[in-house]
Amino acid sequence: MKRVAVVGGGIVGVATAHTLQQRGLQVTVFEKEDRLAAHQTGRNSGVIHSGIYYPPGSLKARTCLRGRALLEAFCDRHAIAWKRCGKVIVATQPSQVEKLRDLGRRGEEHGLQVRWLDQPGLRQIEPACAGLEAIFVPETGVVDYVRVVEKLAETLEVRLKTPWVDTGEFDAWINCAGLYCDKLADSEIKIVPFRGEYYALKSAARELCKTLIYPVPDPRFPFLGVHLTRHVDDTVGAGPNAVLALGRENYDGWSLHVGEALETLTYPGFQRLALKYWRMGLWEQLRSLSKWLFLKELQKLTPELRSHHLEKSKAGIRAQCVRPDGRLLDDFLIYRQGRAVHVLNAPSPAATASLAIAEEIADVLFQ
């Protein structure tokens, strides 16, 4: 095997191409847009995840823990700005306390330096944050993932504005197509796109968030809840929520793609998912339409926030795989099919884990 195509110019695709090139292969990246990192990679919150959320033994846990170390070393080696700022995860109601403690114990099992915080301890780290209990995870950081992709791609052959067509030119190809990965794979699992909308804190309110402030996540879902993130440039983002996107690139919420919307709405997996979790889906949709409701969610963490502190920011779309029976696919999925290796379901923490995911892909390719 000499020549390999990588389909998709997000961070997983470019990291994979970089890794394969280092192993002596001739690699070409195919990207349908006019730039790299145009979708999930360029529209996320920029967090370097610690790995605390993911079950021990899962692919997410393994690749996040290793990928974080590889990513930090890569950034240091290439003088890419990043910060290990840490994160507080906050229980704001009694029903969340035991879930928070379970999460902290999981972090300790992963070898993370979890700090257990009472209310005064939380205020020492985040003076404006409210909560009953919290944990501090110092291994969490932030980075500009677009900058990482640009550096990874410097020595690669990249064909922009070039959708993938398998002409037999390559010995093998890797499907890292993100929002469209299911279109290239022979699989019953389908992508259901969820739009995550962000606000930004105006400069006068940025000191209300010193690090990263997260709620206790609902264990039934792979979404982490609305949170506050101080970015590597010291701006602060708030979000995202998780609403159904009626189109895989429907970032503004209004640019309806009828074919893709119908595909999602008629997919049995989505219908079963929606029937089971319609209350949560309705709440997310209402919060999307109402800045006041979005603010109320943020005020559970930071009560001093006010509506005039928030301004609309970007939106991203999460490529979430859903099984035909309505179950969300929680872990990453990598498998070989003939000459292709398919990467299905690589949302967060895929950016953090990207260099380790690339190693996993290479191992599958060379099997």
Image (cartoon, rainbow, N blue to C red):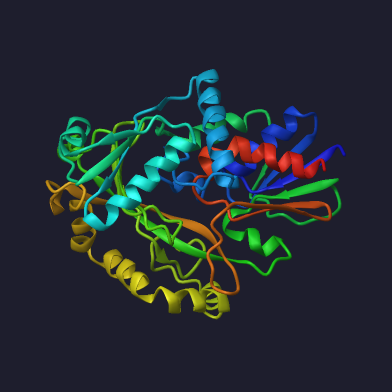
As rendered, which of 105 and 209 lies closer to the eye? 105
Q: How many marks?
A: 0
- Residue 83 to residue 285: above or below: above
Can you give x and y, in whole percent of width and height, for residue 161 in the image?
A: 63, 50
Locate residue 127: give its quadrant: top left
Locate residue 144: give its quadrant: top left
Q: Is residue 155 visible?
A: yes
Residue at image x 57%, y 33%?
66
Q: Quadrant of the C terminus?
A: top right
Q: Quadrant of the N terminus?
A: top right
Residue at image x 19%, y 46%?
131
Q: Is residue 44 shown left or right of residue 129?
A: right
Q: Is residue 313 visible?
A: no
Can you give x and y, in whole percent of width and height, for residue 51 in the image?
A: 48, 40
Can you give x and y, in whole percent of width and height, for residue 140 in the image?
A: 40, 34
- Residue 298 to residue 22: above or below: below
Q: Is residue 209 shown left or right of residue 348?
A: left
Locate residue 23: give its quadrant: top right
Can you give x and y, in whole percent of width and height, for residue 22 in the image?
A: 73, 27
Residue at image x 74%, y 39%?
362
Residue at image x 80%, y 33%?
25
As rendered, which of 80 and 367 lies closer to the eye? 367
As rendered, which of 235 and 225 lies closer to the eye? 225
